[in-house]
Amino acid sequence: MPRSTAARADRDRPTYHHGNLREALITAGLELTRTGGPDALSLRDATRRVGVSPNAAYRHFADREALLAAIAARIQQGMAERMRGFTSPAPAHLTPARAALRAVGLGYIAFARREPGWFEVAFGNADAVPAVEPGAMPPPLAMLVSALDGLVAWGELDAAARPGAEWPCWSAVHGFALLALTGPLRGLPATDVDAAAERTVDAIIAGLLD
C-alpha cells in the first residue's frame, strides 16, 4: 500500500468502538445542533468529533444537507417519544380522547421550548425537512393524526370534519412555539407561557369540537 494511502487509512480509522460511522456522525451532529441549531453543523466539525477525516463522511452522506436531514429525522423521532411521555394535568371533564389531543399539542410546544436548537433543525430548516408525503409523515405529525382519529373513534369529531384537521391544529401549536422562542412571548415568565400554551391548545380543541 502506498505510504500516502496508508496514512489516509490511518487518518480515517474510527476512534469509536461500535464501528458504525453513519450512526456516529448523526450522534455528533445531534450534539452540535442541540444548542446551536442547524447553523452549528458542519461535516468537518462532525467528523472531528468522531475522529475521522472529513472525506470519510462522504461514504454515508452526499453532503452536509444529507447529514442534516438524517439528524432532523432522528430529532423528530425523539420529539415524538417525548411527546408520548408528556404529562400535564388536564381538566377533569375532558374525555380520554380530548386529553390525548391536548397532551400532543402541549408536548409539541414543551419540546420546542426545551430544545430550541433541535426544534429548528426538525421543523425550521428547509434543507433538512422534506415535504410531507402520504404514508411518510414525521413522527410528531403522526401522533397528531392518531389523536384526531381517536376523536372520531370516540364519536367526538364527525368523520366528515376529520380530513385535513391536522393542519390548523399543527399550525396553531407550531406558531405558538415560534412566538415562545423568537417572538414576544420569549420574555415572559415560564409560568405565563405555560398558561398561554394551555389556553391556545384548549381553544383549538374547542374550535374543532364544540
Image: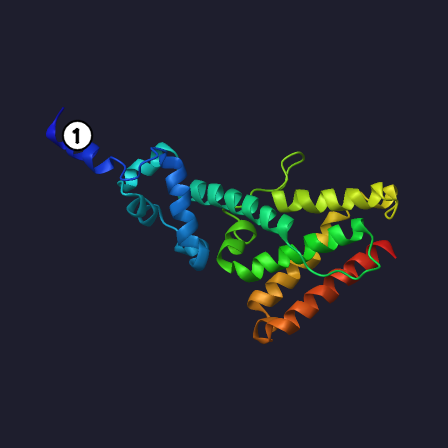
> Does the rendering let one see residue 61?
no
Vertical side of 1 occupied by 29: above or below: below
- Give left or right: position of 11 versus 91: left
Image quadrant in which you'd find residue 63: top left
Q: How is the image coloured?
A: rainbow
Vertical side of 125 occupied by 89: above or below: below
Quick one: quadrant of the C terminus?
A: bottom right
* Location of residue 144 in the rendering, given as x and y in whole percent from the top left corner: 70, 47
Vertical side of 138 occupied by 82: above or below: below
> Does the rendering let one see residue 39?
yes
Q: Residues within 10 Å of mark 1 (few under 14, many from 20)?
A: few
- Give left or right: position of 86 versus 124: right
Q: Secondary structure at mark 1?
A: helix
Q: Residue furthest left?
A: 3
Residue displayed at 78% across by 42% down: 149
Q: Residue furthest bottom?
A: 188
Residue displayed at 48% across by 43% down: 69
* Location of residue 32 in the rendering, given as x and y in whole percent from the top left corner: 39, 53
The residue at which mark 1 appears reads as 5
Residue displayed at 44% across by 40% down: 66
* Location of residue 98 in the rendering, given as x and y in whole percent from the top left corner: 79, 52
* Location of residue 137 in the rendering, given as x and y in whole percent from the top left corner: 64, 40
Vertical side of 121 occupied by 199: above or below: below
Which sits in the foreground, 1 or 144?
A: 144
